[in-house]
Amino acid sequence: MSAFQFISLLNLQEYTPCGVPVPDEWVVTDPLIGLRNNDKIIAPRGFITDLASIPRPFRGLLNVNGLLRAPAVLHDWLYCSQRYSRAEADAIFLEAMEARGMDKATRYTVYAIVRAFGWRYYNKRKASLG
C-alpha cells in the first residue's frame, strides 16, 4: 500500500496565452496537493503541463485523461521543480498512480516507460535551471 495520497483535486484549463490555445498544454488552476510521509508536494496554481510526455510508440496504449492525469501533472511538477532526484520523482509517480487506483500492470508499465525515457525530460529541466 502506498504512503502517498492526494489531498486536493486536479483542476485544469487550456493554456491560452494571448487568447490562443496551445495544443496539449494545460494550466493548473488550483494547487494539486499530494501528501507522502507528511511531506506536502504541491503543483502550484499557474503551473503549465502537457499531462504526460509519452514517447510516440506508447501513446495509443495510455489514456492521459483517465486515472493517469493527476499523477502525470504531479510528476511533471516533480521534474520541473527538481526538488527530488529523478529516481525519487519516479517512485512518487508510481505511488501516486497507485493512490489513484490504477491497476498494477498499467502503473508498472507506465513506470517502466518513465524509467527508460524520462531522463531526457528530467535533464532538460535540470539544464534550464542552470
Image (spheres, rainbow, N blue to C red):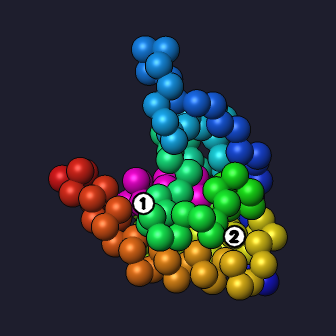
Q: Eyeballing the image, is 109 above or below 19?
A: below
Q: Which residue is mark 2?
A: 97
- List x then y, in percent, for residue 46: 52, 33
- Distance from the alpha carbon under mark 2 to that under mark 1: 16 Å
Residue 71 or residue 1, whichever sits in front: 71
Name the outermost residue toward the left: 130
Q: Is residue 39 left or right of residue 67?
A: left
Question: Dominant secondary structure of the magenta stretch?
Answer: helix
- List x then y, in percent, for residue 51: 56, 51
- List x then y, in percent, for residue 76: 49, 56
Asked if the residue at tag 1 contacts the one at tag 2, i.e. Cβ–Cβ closer than 8 Å, the answer is no
Is residue 41 visible in this depiction of the protein? Answer: no
Q: Which amino acid is tagged 2?
A: Met
Q: Is residue 20 left or right of residue 125?
A: right
* Residue appearing at x 51%, y 41% in the figure: 24
- Tell me the magenta residue range: 72-82
Q: Eyeballing the image, is 57 above or below 48?
A: below
* Residue appearing at x 67%, y 60% in the figure: 63
Secondary structure beneath label 2: helix
Secondary structure beneath label 1: helix
Residue 79's tag is 1
Q: Eyeballing the image, is 35 above or below 81?
A: below
- List x then y, in percent, for residue 16: 50, 23
Residue 45 or residue 27, whichever sits in front: 27
The quarter of the displayed image where residue 102 is located: bottom right
Is residue 77 visible in this depiction of the protein? Answer: yes
Q: Which amino acid is tagged 1?
A: Tyr
